Image: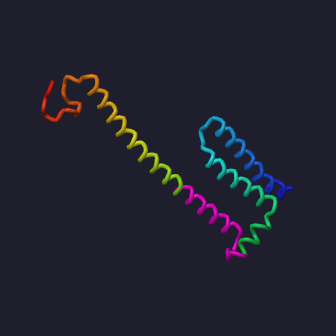
Amino acid sequence: MSAIIYRSLPIVAALILLIYLFFMLRDKSIQHKYVYLWSILSLGVVVLAIFPNLALKAASLLGFETAANLLLSIAAFILLLSSIAMSVDLSRRQRREEDLTQSIALLEKRVRDLENPEDGTNGESDGNSSV
C-alpha cells in the first residue's frame, strides 16, 4: 500500500503544479517560456514516478551511486541554468529600462523646448539671430 502512495504522490504533485501553471498563465503572471520549462520538468517527475527503475539505470550508467544523487545533481543543474537565464533576462530588461528612461527624458526636453520657443534653448540657434 505504501508503494502506491509513494508512486502516486509525485504524480499528484506534478498535476497540481501543471494546474497552478495554467492559472498563472491565464492570469499572465508567467511567460510561456517558463511554463514550458516547468511543464517538461513536471512530466519528467511523472515518468520517473511511473518508471522508477529508469532513474536507477540512468544513475548506474552515469556513475552515480544512487538515483537520489543523480536526481539531486540534475535538479541543481536545472536550477543553475534557470538562474543564469533569469539573470540574462533581468539584465536585458534593465538595459531596456535605461534606454527608455533616457528616451523619455529627451522627449520631455524636446516638448518643453517646443512649448517655450522664446527661451531660445531649443538647440536650433547657432548664435546668429536673423529675423
Measured from the top left, where is residue 63 in percent x and y? 68, 77
Classify residue 119 as left or right of residue 34.
left
Q: Residue furthest right?
A: 1
* Magenta stretch in the rendered image: 61-83
Q: Nearer the viewer, residue 3 or 72?
A: 72
Which residue is pictured at 75% across the width and 70% down the height? 56
Who is closer to the viewer here, 39 or 76? 39
Residue 105 x/y as whole percent: 33, 35
Task: Give the residue furthest to the front.
Answer: 131
Expressed as whole percent of the image width and height from the top left, the position of residue 127 reads 13, 34
Instruction: Give the quarter of the image for residue 126.
Output: top left
Percent coordinates x, y for residue 92 in the rendering: 46, 49
Which of 26 and 20 lies nearest the eye of the viewer?
26
Which is the main secondary structure of the residues drawn in magenta?
helix
Residue 71 shown in magenta:
yes
Quadrant where the C terminus sits is top left
Who's the residue at 72% across and 76% down the image? 61
Instruction: Specify how the rendered protein is coloured.
Output: rainbow
Give whichever of 4, 107 is nearer the camera.
Answer: 107
Q: Residue at x 71, y 68 (%)?
A: 67
Marks counted in the figure total: 0
Q: Is residue 10 above or below residue 104?
A: below
Magenta span has 38? no
Position of the N terminus, as image quadrant, is bottom right
Furthest-left residue in view?
Answer: 128
Left or right: where does residue 59 sit relative to residue 104?
A: right
Q: Residue at x 69, y 50 (%)?
A: 39
- Position of residue 93 relative to residue 57, above or below, is above
